[in-house]
Image (cartoon, grey):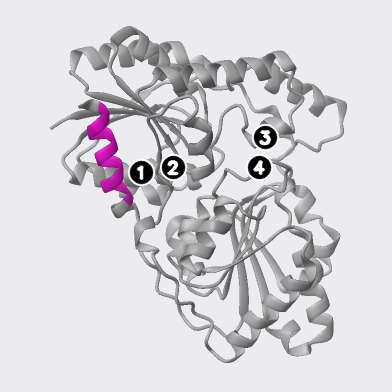
Amino acid sequence: MKKILLITYYWPPAGGSGVQRWLNFSKYLVELGWNITVLVPDNPSYPIIDNSISKSISSSLEVIKVPIFEPVNILNRSNKKNRDHINSSGLFYKIILWIRSNLFFPDSRMFWINKVSKLASSYVIKNNIDCIITTAPPFSTHVIGYNIKLKTNVKWITDFRDPWSDFFPFKQLPMSNIIKERHLKWEQKCLTYCDTVLTTSPSLTKTYLKANKNTHTVTNGYEAVIKTEPTDKFVVLYTGVMKSVQNPQNLWIVLKELCMENKDFSKDLLVDLIGDFDSSIVNDNYIKSLSSNVRFKGYLDVVNLKEQLKKAEVLLLSSVNLEGVNNIIPGKLFLYLSVKKPILAFSALDSDVENIINETKSGRVFDYSNKVELKKYILVLYNQFKAKHNSIDSIEIDKYSYKHLSKKLSDIIDKTIN
């Protein structure tokens, strides 16, 4: 059995989409014959906890926990109602953002780097590890991978769940040009020095191929198809994090107009917003005008979330509304594919998101300004709901199951080693 050492910050009991990728891949790679050890932080400061997913960890995995020191997140402690913070106007928050952007490199998990690099390098040598995999963000894991590669020359795969120097939060932070250049330098250093690069989107693969010709797209996926249940409400559901730059304001305007124009629509509409929402969204005047039709719910564990998904009629997806950001595919897209209900997505046109939704015939994609066509489409979905024909005949979604993707990943790892 060939041996893999996976280094990841996000691991159960961490909740959210960041943990799902390698939690599922590790399970199926073990079934495909790989011996996997996972190195994770011992006392991390995860923003979301989901104890239910710990049951999904393969019993065949060895898990090594290394203590991590993380600076106290003053923002989250003192301003829990606004986890975005980018738009905070107070001097105190501006100072904290500057410190976060310029003094912690590559991120606030930087104090983990030396300890893990030393321990993991020793582990690689003593246990004859064939390949290490680092997955980011946080990008400190790739710096760890670089250090291990430098010391042991073990085969190294970098997994970019998001782009590094082009990471969209960086676009909003008060980051100095010197630090931006440092991120770019380290990104290029890791890309060129590693043996294989994995990305989650075709667009990012196209970019990274310029630095490393052994770059492959392995998207996120879904675990199993979710069987839906009939409901007497026209439920529009969103799950996950929604930052201020993801707010699809035209949707709230259109829904309000339809409620005013159609009493039945107003009676049937229920918008379930599940997860963590920036305060600018919670306090959005357009959303407040729909208060009788909108329910904000906190984070739900995987089991309860699937129960909510079973009752959804429309699945809302909202990418980042920033110029030039079209190489990120939200992990929830693949969860939505497993529900086989129409996906209503907001994204830059001709993006990876639009291509997948069009390819699978699983819904419609709108840019953030197309109000007329959006209104027409919602009416089509509502009429289908009233006629009890709101399921969709999506195609080719099987290739996005984690089981299928793991076979592709296994081949990539095998070629990297050999």
Q: Which residue is mark 3?
A: 169
Q: Amino acid at mark 3?
A: Pro
Q: CA distance from mark 4 to mark 3?
A: 11 Å
* N-terminal label among 1 and 3: 1
Instruction: Please provide the residue range marked out in magenta.
Output: 405-416
Q: CA distance from mark 4 to mark 2?
A: 23 Å
Disc assigned to residue 301: none
User: How far across and down, in percent of the image, does residue 249 sit?
Assistant: 78, 60
Q: Is residue 316 above or below residue 85?
A: below
The crowding category of the residue bearing disc 4, from other C-alpha atoms within 10 Å (few below 14, some 14 to 19, many at least 20), is some
Q: Which residue is mark 2?
A: 19
Q: Residue at x 52, y 87 (%)?
A: 389
Q: Residue at x 22, y 12 (%)?
A: 125
Determine the secondary structure under disc 1. helix
User: How far across and down, in percent of the image, does residue 28 sit?
Assistant: 25, 47
Q: Which residue is mark 4?
A: 325
Q: Is residue 343 above or below residue 186?
A: below
Do residues under tags 2 and 1 come within 8 Å of each other at their CB atoms?
yes
Q: Quadrant of the C terminus?
A: top left
Q: Nearer the viewer, residue 371 or 234?
A: 371
Q: Nearer the viewer, mark 4 or mark 3?
A: 4
